[in-house]
Amino acid sequence: MSLFPPTFENIQKAAQLLREGELVAFPTETVYGLGADAFQEKACQKIYTAKGRPSFNPLIVHCLENTQVEELAFLGQDAQKLAAQFWPGPLTLILKKRTPSLLPSIVTAGLETVAVRIPLHPTARALLKAFGRPIAAPSANRSGFLSPTLARHVLEDLHSKVAMILEGPPIEVGLESTILDLSEDVPILLRAGGLEIEKIQEFLGQKIFMNQTVSKIKSPGQLLKHYAPHLPLRFNAEDVDSEEGLLAFGSPLSGSKVTFNLSKTENLEEAAQNLFAFLHLLDERSDITGIAVQSIPEHGLGIAINDRLRRAAEGSKKI
Ligand code: TXA
Ligand code: MG
């Protein structure tokens, strides 16, 4: 298996593979996705098998434009406003599903809602256009492991399980999409992600809550151990051991065996872009015993970065 640049021919080939019920990995502006024809049950089943993903954890359906979304779900007032403002982009909306639905129930894990988003990345868009139908795609990593921001990550994690991997151009956001549930009376944040929650709040003119109790029931995937590196990870580190690798932010602590700096200038966009790639690089090393991460401010993209680090720290705890 090799990596395929997104030439016209390769995009056509990838679309054909999707029609044949195969899996194709492709970049989005957030992370790489593992795509299947959203209308083919068997193809979507392959996603769960390849990832080792529990069947109760539904998939995000990627669409080219609003008309495609409207065939699958009801866009209420808030959804229409948010779509006009933030799509295409790193925002996933949970909407009430139309019935009867073209989507096999495996895509939504039997729920009455569906997660949809319109991606911005040129390769994702070219593939959606060539294919002409929605593509169901979770992040292209084995369930519970680090999300992929480079084609190489997908190759290493899933190589034998995917028919084709489209590579590049580089991903701009580097964190999974923000998930907003619009299926109830008030919007609820289910996952902090690549679109800052402050931007959504400002645009809607209201505070958005992340209701832990609700979100536990509502976003099954958020219950799972996630983003776990193999090495133990501790965050908000104020010192670092000589046997540890350091993930720095701003001015780096001294004394580590190896250091990767998420952003020397404390730029959260840059830190988000680098996060998964640097975690992968540190996690591949055999000469360190753990990863220490310096603290990152809890605002803007920092909220999503800290969420991923918290999960990585939890996931890597030896139980
Ligand atoms: O940026 C992204 O969102 C990437 C790219 C590929 O688009 N995709 C992604 O998918 O992160 P995944 O499967 O790793 O995460 C999707 C999350 C899961 O936590 C899942 O539980 C939640 O979305 N989800 C999907 N459908 C849902 C629904 N109907 N209600 C609530 N949560 C849902
Ligand atoms: Mg994922």
Image: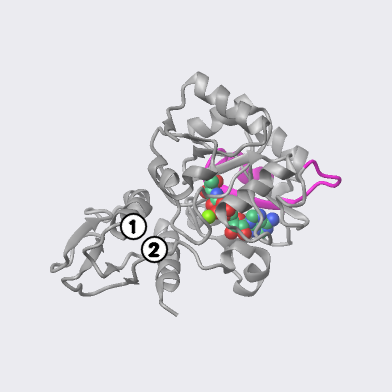
Q: Quadrant of residue 292?
A: bottom left
Camera-side mark, 1 or 2: 2
Residue identified by numbered label 1 = 279
Which amino acid, by three-letter code, is at mark 2? Answer: Pro
Q: Is residue 162 magenta?
A: no
In three-dimensional space, the C-alpha distance between marks 1 and 2, rounded to whole angstroms, equals 7 Å
Q: Position of residue 142 (x, y in %)?
A: 51, 55
Q: Quadrant of residue 151?
A: top left
Residues at marks 1 and 2 touching, judged by CB atoms closer than 8 Å = yes
Q: Which mark is residue 71?
A: none
Q: Is residue 101 magenta?
A: yes
Residue identified by numbered label 2 = 229
How many other residues sit within 10 Å of disc 1, few (<14), some (14-19) or many (≥20)? Answer: many
Q: Position of residue 222 (x, y in %)?
A: 57, 65
Mark 1: secondary structure: helix
Q: Position of residue 27 (x, y in %)?
A: 47, 38
Residue in the foreground of this view, choosing between 83 and 117: 117
What residue is shown at x 31% (from left), y 72% (from top)?
236
* Numbered-mark total: 2
Instruction: Point out the residue furthest to the top here.
Output: 9
Q: Which residues are magenta?
A: 80-102
Ligand 1 quarter of the rendering: bottom right
Which amino acid, by three-letter code, is at mark 1? Answer: Leu
